[in-house]
Image: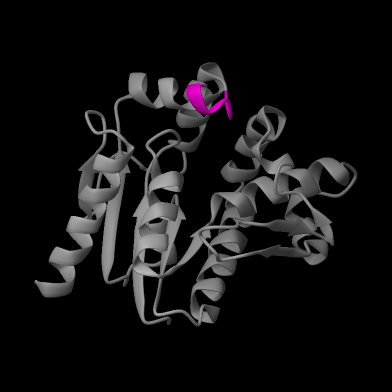
């Protein structure tokens, strides 16, 4: 495993992606957005409607950069960095995330990418991260916020409708508890924090763990 792993779980709109990128950049760490893998898989499924989703892993040529300042995502040679962020893919990814076979595949893929990171450390974020993908991470954080605040943030980012966010919460909660921290996981509630405050809070948790 890479030198120092920071694992960040949390629901959509909690700020985990933007905060994780900023934290990784400030620490000189790599950054892995595991949600991008699910979104890319959703595109792959839409492109191959005749193939059962469980069998699509065989032809899933996926790559993602770990540079927090310049993320790029490729699917079978095609740049899908922008496409994975569209509302259409956000709507389609729910069915992918509920499929336990695909979830197992994605979790294994994320674990392998963490091992391949040759930087001093890595910040990896998504769901299942602190409990399944990186349960032995040096720092494990559950980043959350109230539903109202999360919906507002998604609207400001124009990345996902409030209605779809609520539906994804409901759907994902059937397969993973992303609102309750497991033992050893630090809860960081960003409801009353702005972006910089959220970044600083996470950095404080990391520093405390380093010297604790």
The C terminus lies in quadrant: bottom left
105 or 67, which is in the foreground? 67
The residue nearer to you, when weighing 111 against 31, is 31
Q: Quadrant of residue 28?
A: bottom left
Q: Position of residue 41 (x, y in %)?
A: 71, 50
The region drawn magenta spans: 156-160
* Quarter of the figure with residue 84: top right
Q: Against 86, is 130 above or below?
A: below
For the N terminus, give its image quadrant. Answer: bottom left
* Residue at figure coordinates x 43%, y 36% from the top left: 173
103 up-or-down from 42: above or below: below
Residue toward you, 208 or 70: 70
Residue 113 percent coordinates (x, y): 56, 72
- Residue at far right of view: 50
Q: In this view of the protein, can residue 172 be seen by the observer?
A: yes
Q: Can residue 131 be spotted in the picture? A: no
Query: For the point 40% across and 62% down, which residue is it?
Result: 24
Residue located 37% across and 36% down the image: 14
Residue drawn at x 32%, y 70% as measured from the top left: 137
């Amino acid at each position: 495993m890479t030198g120092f792993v920071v694992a960040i779980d949390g629901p959509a709109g909690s700020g985990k992606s933007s905060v994780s990128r900023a934290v990784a950049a400030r620490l000189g760490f790599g950054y892995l957005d595991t949600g991008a893998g699910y979104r890319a898989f959703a595109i792959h499924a839409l492109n191959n409607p005749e193939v059962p989703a469980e069998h699509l892993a065989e032809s899933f040529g996926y790559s993602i950069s770990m540079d927090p300042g310049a993320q790029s995502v490729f699917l079978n040679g095609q740049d899908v960095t922008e496409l994975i962020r569209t509302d259409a893919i956000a709507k389609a990814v729910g069915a992918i995330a509920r499929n336990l076979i695909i979830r197992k595949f994605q979790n294994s893929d994320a674990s392998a990418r963490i091992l391949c990171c040759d930087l001093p450390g890595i910040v990896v974020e998504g769901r299942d991260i602190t409990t399944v993908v990186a349960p032995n991470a040096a720092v494990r954080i559950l980043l959350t916020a109230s539903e109202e605040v999360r919906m507002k943030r998604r609207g400001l980012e124009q990345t996902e409708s409030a209605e779809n966010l609520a539906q994804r919460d409901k759907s994902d909660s059937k397969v993973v508890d992303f609102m309750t921290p497991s033992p050893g996981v630090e809860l960081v509630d960003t409801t009353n924090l702005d972006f910089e405050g959220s970044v600083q809070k996470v950095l404080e948790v990391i520093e405390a763990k380093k010297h604790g």
